[in-house]
Amino acid sequence: MRIVNIGTFLLPIRFSLKGMMEGDGRRRLAKALTAHLSDFQSRALTTGDGLFLDVQSSAHQRMETMVFSGVTVTEAGDAVRLYVSSLAVGFVVVEMNLPDDLVLDLDDEAACERFKEYEGPITERVEALLPAWCRQIAGAADPGLLRPVPGSALDQGKLLWWHRVCVDGRPDVEFPGARWYGVPVELVGGAEAKIATGVTNLHSAGRTEVINDVVEGLMIATQEWIVVDEAKRTIAAHLLGLSESAAGRVITIDAQYADVLELTEEVTLRNLLLGQESRYLTTPRRLIRHAATEAWHVTAEAQELEGRTAALRDLFSLHRERIFNNRDDRRNLLVFVFTAITLIQSILVWYDFITSDATGFGGEPRPAIAIVVLVLAVITGIIALRPDKRGRGRVKIPKPRFVPEHQVDRAADDSPRTTVSTSKS
């Protein structure tokens, strides 16, 4: 029985999509990766049954997000194909040959342990090679084409998960989750596939080359899933930061707002690349991609993502307005305090002038006047700066003034233009 494992990992760097879309940035990155990843070959190790694509084929060259693809053989003899995407997503594709009687019910503990006996060693060997490959990729990239990795991203430089494709398995041994709940896809010549979360069943009907369509369609859908997941994580992180800093500073709010704008730009560019890529997909790859996004609920989440991002931008604007309103309130209070102090001082200075010995009106109460000015200033400041728990933070909404219906009708008859009357405060 033939199992094709598609492993996903994130690179420890991020490529600047703007830099790659301008000029020959993408071509320079592809050449640099080919030069640094010298252990990988593009043609010599492609399997005879058509599992791996030749990277020189026109179909693969039209995969806009893929900037590198090559095959290498591990010390244990595993043929591993490595894909590097411009979205900083990496893929490894490994094939396993398992006994035909091996049941692939991963929910069954005994069956899962027996399956892991075959998959576990391959996982360990791939995980041991990933750090070195990531270092080579990071060293090959031009610093001008890099940007910071967001803190909400998944773990970088390690294998995140396997998506397992069972090829031409019997109904009693293939993945039951995909057979029961998978999204079906009708391919050419009677071939069909059922895609579920983490597993896929493929019946090739003798067309062994359709595995290429399944592998590349799943990789494109996985990139879409990662884009949506990372954006949701970033939005959640900003919402938590916004709620924790209820009395935050405008500098912090502006920095977070700038991050949200950067997220919006990044998601837009990523979707632009993925949309451009989908235009050049062959029909089987497009069908596989749509079925995978439906099975993983990526389409619905992506449609809601734009609305969530816009809502987050509105929240930042509201918080920023609240901070400025609080500043205006404090400034107005200080103006009132200093005005009151100045007024009190003016009155007492005139009183001091009138009661001075030079005018012959009385004694010299200057020390007493100074004490009175100090006491009154302190009392006035305390009263003015006392927080108003009932009115602070509330928005006063003016009451609407209702116009009788007969007046509205008369106004409509007298004027051809509809006017809105507002009450004066």
Image (spheres, helix red, strand yellow):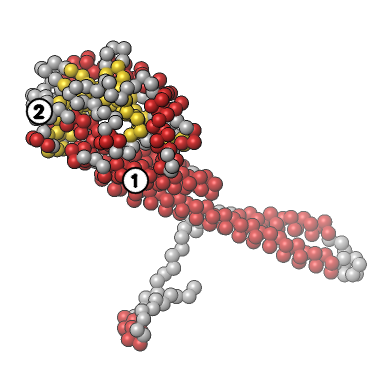
Quadrant where the N terminus is found in the figure: top left
Q: Residue 170: horizontal and vertical position, in percent?
A: 8, 24
Left or right, 249 with respect to 3, comes to right
Q: Residue 367: horizontal and vertical position, in percent?
A: 82, 56
User: Which element carries disc 1, helix, strand or loop?
Assistant: helix
* Viewer-nearest residue: 341 or 161: 161
| C-alpha separation, residue under disc 1 versus residue under disc 2 | 36 Å
Residue at 30% from the left image edge and 25% from the top image edge: 42
Whether residue 97 is visible here, answered yes or no, is yes
Residue at 39% from the left image edge and 78% from the top image edge: 419
Question: Is the residue marked by circle 2 packed among few (<14), some (14-19), or many (20+) residues within 10 Å?
Answer: few
Question: Which amino acid, mark 1?
Answer: Leu
Query: Which of the numbered marks, if any, corresponds to residue 175?
Result: none
Q: Residue 134: horizontal and vertical position, in percent?
A: 40, 25
> Which badge, 1 or 2, comes first in the chain's sequence?
2
Question: Which amino acid, mark 2?
Answer: Gly
Left or right, 26 with respect to 374, comes to left
Residue at 40% from the left image edge and 20% from the top image edge: 132
Front disc: 1 or 2: 2
Query: Which of the numbered marks, if any, corresponds to residue 272?
Result: 1
Residue indicated by mark 2? 206
* Viewer-nearest residue: 4 or 359: 4
Q: Residue 2: horizontal and vertical position, in percent?
A: 16, 21
